[in-house]
Image (cartoon, rainbow, N blue to C red):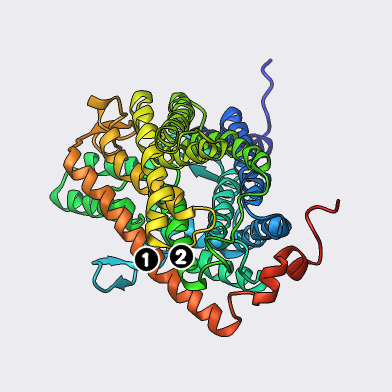
Amino acid sequence: MKFAFPPPLRAVGLGLLLAAAAAGAALAQDAAAAAAAPVPNKGDTAWMLVSTALVLMMSVPGLALFYGGLVRTRNMASVLSQVFAIVALVSIIWVVYGYSLAFTEGSHAAVPLFGVDLNAFVGGFSRAFLAGMDANSTAGTFSNGVVIPEFAYMAFQMTFACITPALIIGSFAERIKFSSLLVFVALWVTLIYFPIAHSVWYWAGPDAVADAARALAAATTDAAKAEAQAHLDAVNANAGYLFQVGALDFAGGTVVHINAGIAGFVGCLVIGKRIGFPREVGPPHSITMSMIGASLLWVGWFGFNAGSNLESNGATALAFVNTFVATSAATLSWAFVEWALRGKPSLLGMISGAVAGLVAITPASGFAGPMGSVVLGLVAGGVCFFFVDYVKRWGGYDDSLDVFGVHCVGGIVGAVATGFLVAPALGGVGLVDYATNPGTAAPATYVMADQVLKQVKAVLFTLIYSGVGSFILYKIVDLVFGLRVSKEAEMEGLDITSHGERAYNM
């Protein structure tokens, strides 16, 4: 005898089966969606967190010790205080609104003269106070289908925002009011750094480009093709101005070094020379301390450059090697040039050469080959020595710790050289096209003259925007608060007069 459910139970059973099937289908869809969504790789995440810590180490203690050792004893604590306070201040500004302005999509209102919209220069406030960001949020890298936690990306970029204004203080060390410096830095990162970072580094990402390109390839009618092409154009246009121009800056030659270098140079001119400069300004009080700081900078710079690849792969290793050998070459270049012209190679010269090499390789670190990086380091060491030792003396300006001669000039050398060194014929990696073969980073057409011109445009844009903008901000702060300490305070030293303490009590 066959057993059968009565009609009501058969209906219930059928309903349960249908519900189970629907639930299974929904779970399958969710699973498919989950499989399609890229998940951060633990190795990439670990590398980015390590890189973030390394770049923070560049500021505190690296830059603080490097700068501190170069000033006179009575101003050591003041320089340490300035660097430390800047890092703290900018990190808070960054999470409140800085990250959002630098790395989110902004308004598409038209900007006169440039022929682009406002989003080309500054982002919006969608991530203000880190709104909408949690532990599951991701940020794209430079590879299709590869992401990292957005918190890791945000924190990594935060360390860049912190060190850039800290670099500026070397140009007018030993003579600026602490309170005025903090006001200037808050204004400068908001109105200068965030827009330049957005202009150079913001874009929709490789996956957005690939998706739009796939849609265009799949379109079958003229109307569909036109719509898909318009969407692809919009995705490509959703980028910073200099990114759209095609300028290359792997880790901050324009954003960090030229930007800070020209701002520092303008600052030293506006604030004026130190009392007694150059005759009564003594030598650095601790070359030992500066060597320790420079060494920390060199180690931390591996996070700065190799970390800028945003993942851990062969391109990361290339940037790592380039950072190593370019710095070594610049160290030797400065030392031998100084030896030939001054009779002796100094430790101060070698550590200055190392920093010059680090600066120069920054924009090219992920684009050049190792031998090209060696040549770049050799050139940068000699050129920066010339500006620090000769041009500064001829010009008579008091750039206390040679921010202009090392960071601005070294950044310009590296940024322009990137246009040459990216060439595959010179060992470079070439340019990348994410649209021709969607989902794959295919080689793009490279024309050396065109790329070098794009690099020059980026350099000029940064010099003009940061130089003029910084001048205006210095004048505003000087008018409202006064930039410079009194003559008496400068003579006594900023350690006591600004902070009520001494770096050394012996």
The relative height of residue 75 versus residue 17 in the rendered view (above or below) is below
Left or right side of 419 for 169: right
Q: Residue furthest bottom?
A: 480
For this rendering, which residue is in front, 305 or 496? 496
Left or right side of 398 for 410: left
Quarter of the image where one finds residue 77: bottom right
For the residues labelled 2 and 1, say whether their Cβ atoms are less than 8 Å apart. Answer: yes
Which element is circle 1 on?
helix
Q: Which residue is mark 2?
A: 192
Left or right side of 405 for 54: right
Q: Quadrant of the N terminus?
A: top right
Q: Residue furthest top?
A: 1
Q: CA distance from mark 2 to mark 1?
A: 8 Å
Residue pictured at 39% horizontal, 42% vertical: 363
The relative height of residue 475 versus residue 435 in the rendered view (above or below) is below
Residue pictured at 75% horizontal, 70% vertical: 497
The relative height of residue 293 versus residue 100 in the rendered view (above or below) is above
Q: Which residue is mark 1?
A: 465
Q: Label 2 amino acid?
A: Ile
Q: Residue furthest left?
A: 222
Residue 473 placed where, x, y %? 49, 74
Categorize mark 1 by other alpha carbons within 10 Å: few (<14), some (14-19), many (20+).
Answer: some
Residue pictured at 53% horizontal, 54% vertical: 164
Q: Label 1 amino acid?
A: Tyr
For this rendering, which residue is in front, 442 or 209? 442
* Number of numbered labels in the structure image: 2
Residue 186 placed where, x, y %? 58, 68
Which element is circle 2 on?
helix
For this rendering, which residue is in front, 348 or 432? 348
Q: Earlier in the sequence, mark 2 or mark 1?
A: 2
Residue pictured at 69% horizontal, 21% vertical: 3
